[in-house]
Amino acid sequence: MHVIRRKATLSVLLMVSMGHLLNDMFQAVIPSIYPMIKETLGLSFMQVGAITLTNQITSSLLQPMVGYFSDRHPRPYALVAGMCFTLTGLLLLSMADSFPLVLFSVAFVGVGSSVLHPESSKIARMASGGAKGMAQSIFQIGGNVGRAIGPVMVALIVVPHGQGSIRWFALMAVLAIWVLARIGSWYKKQLERYGRTKSKFDIENESHLSRRQVIVALLALLVLMFSKDFYTANIQNYLTFYMIDKFGLSVASSQYVLFAFLVSTAVGLLIGGEVGDRYGRKYVIWFSILGSSPFALLLPYCNLTWTIVLAILVGMVMSSAMSAILVYGTELLPGNVGMISGAFFGLSFGLGGIGSALFGWIADLTSIQHVFQLTAYLPLLGMAAYFLPNIKEEQQ
């Protein structure tokens, strides 16, 4: 692997990925228990929406602020502190017997997530050995796996045993604290050895871009994120409904198709990180979003077999962009890795939530098949990559 050849601290990357896996698994617990707490606490759909909003505000909007602070005032054990918030939130959620206490609980879980993403992203860069794209891919795959297994864990643990069994997830949060403490020890040594903002492997931006070029590039990245996250939100949330509605698949069979899509996104992340490190992140961004448009445009008009094949191809090609976009953004504004990572992760979560709600509303007004026909044009916004300047990198 490229990341090993570049002498990355692979053990640190794997621990960061494990921390990401556990964090996002805990996040996935919250929507998975909605049917249970809605019934037991007698909540309305508006109150359920308020729970999601509270969690999204604390987990998404706080991330850029946490990243900005950590860039200027690094705290080696911030990840441990963040996971302690998550642990507290899970314990409170396991015994929450009122709507306000549920809101308070998910806010704590959200705060923990807002710390983990920018801090872990920065540590992954420090441990990358220069292979920053691959390092980000390894980190992000942990989150993908965590989000995928979260609902399964809820089905196995919480559904049979009730709300109180959420405390078992709190025990897993203790495991996460131990893993993150080991990362914190390594991070502390890096700060002592190489200084506040730069590690041995932290490559500075040598392209000397003008302020206007940086602003234009950031705006182009926002358009690309919008395209990718809106389209992905539609697939992740409504692919099962689409397969059932158009092809008459069973619920179980449609879940297998969704699983295949999620696996393809993990593969795409690894490929995108490796290719970006070797040949340049701008080319990966071009290919991953605009290059997925033919598959996306064909998908709503194909038979069952080709729909599954195209869904897998779209997932693999489009997901390869995330690590490239994130690393490219940090190279635009060197020294602000935490802030950029927090802003991009927060934006990704926020856009995904907005897209899910919007497409659900459109599906109610029209049909789920119409939504897939409409969203098929989103990858064409990948043309915004034209406005990304070339960034030169030092070679190690």
Image (spheres, rainbow, N blue to C red):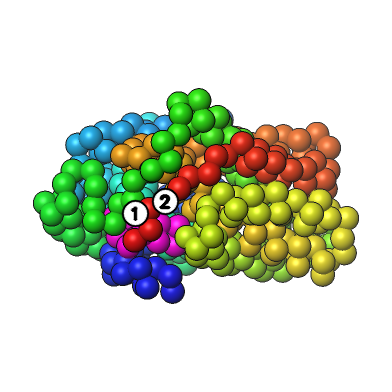
**Would residue 247 be visible to someone looking at this image?**
yes
Residue 125 drawn in magenta? yes
Q: Which residue is mark 1?
A: 125
Q: Quadrant of residue 153?
A: bottom left
Report x, y in % for residue 290.
Answer: 70, 49
Q: Secondary structure at mark 1?
A: helix
Q: Amino acid at mark 2?
A: Glu
CA–CA distance in space, label 2 to label 1: 14 Å
Q: Amino acid at mark 1?
A: Arg
How many numbered marks appear?
A: 2
**Would residue 147 be visible to someone looking at this image?**
no
Q: Quadrant of the C terminus?
A: bottom left
Report x, y in % for residue 145.
Answer: 48, 63
> Which residues fall within the magenta stretch?
124-134
Report x, y in % for residue 307.
Answer: 80, 63
**Which residue is found at the position 84% from the left and 55% from the top?**
298
Report x, y in % for residue 21.
Answer: 40, 60
**Which residue is found at the position 45% from the left and 34% from the top?**
209
Q: What is the residue that sits farthest to the top in this orientation?
A: 212
Q: 10 Å neighbourhood of mark 2: few (<14), some, or many (≥20)? A: some
**Looking at the picture, does residue 93 appear above or below residue 162?**
above
Residue 393: which numbered mark, if any? Answer: 2
Residue 241: which numbered mark, if any? Answer: none
Would you say 314 lies left or right of 154 here? right
Q: Nearer the viewer, residue 379 or 152?
A: 379
Q: Nearer the viewer, residue 25 or 132?
A: 132
**Which residue is found at the position 76% from the left and 62% from the top?**
310
Would you say 133 lies left or right of 116 here? right
Residue 93 drawn in magenta? no
Q: Secondary structure at mark 2?
A: loop
